[in-house]
Image: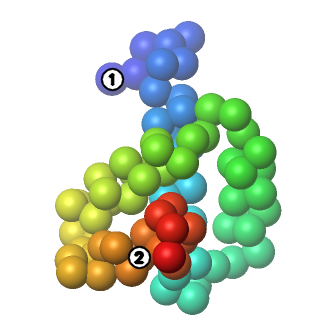
Amino acid sequence: MRISGDDTDRPWRKSRLAARILFRKEAGRMTARDQRIGRLLAHDPEVTNRLIQQGIYSIRYQGRRIGDRKHEFDQNLGLVAR
């Protein structure tokens, strides 16, 4: 349960949201709302590439399998060099 005034998880929650938006982008289902929120998150100093990557892997293990395409997925999102 979240405690009122406790912001320790805020960067993690924002990064997971960014990860979900990246999944939609890769699937070709990105909406205008996703783009607008993505732009806000891209300029947010609390949202780091490392936290987004952790969010991606966390979501992946909750049912959205990337499997053998992990490296390709990271390249498409610009998380690793091509």
Q: Nearer the viewer, residue 66 or 1?
A: 66
Q: Residue furthest bottom?
A: 28
User: What residue is rendered at 46% in x and 27% in y?
Assistant: 9
**For the N terminus, which image quadrant?**
top left
Q: Which residue is mark 1?
A: 1
Quick check: can you spot residue 54? yes
- Up-down relation of residue 26 to residue 10 (above or below): below
Percent x, y for residue 13?
A: 49, 40
CA–CA distance between discs 1 and 2? 33 Å
Which numbered circle lies on residue 55?
none
- Up-down relation of residue 18 to residue 12 (above or below): below
User: What residue is rendered at 58% in x and 78% in y?
Assistant: 25
Q: Nearer the viewer, residue 42 or 74?
A: 74
> Label 2 neighbourhood size at 10 Å, few (<14), some (14-19), many (20+)?
some
User: What residue is rendered at 78% in x and 62% in y?
Assistant: 36
> Label 1 neighbourhood size at 10 Å, few (<14), some (14-19), many (20+)?
few
Occupied quadrant, residue 21:
bottom right
Q: Nearer the viewer, mark 1 or mark 2?
A: 2
- Residue type pointed to by label 2: Phe
Left or right of 69 in this view: 22: right
Percent x, y for residue 81?
A: 51, 68
Quick check: can you spot residue 17? no
Left or right of 12 in this view: 78: right
User: What residue is rendered at 48% in x and 19% in y?
Assistant: 8
Q: Which residue is mark 2?
A: 73
Percent x, y for residue 72?
A: 39, 80
Mark earlier in primary sequence (1, 2): 1
Left or right of 27 in this view: 44: right
Percent x, y for residue 61?
A: 21, 61
User: Label 2's element?
Assistant: helix
- Up-down relation of residue 44 to residue 16 (above or below): above
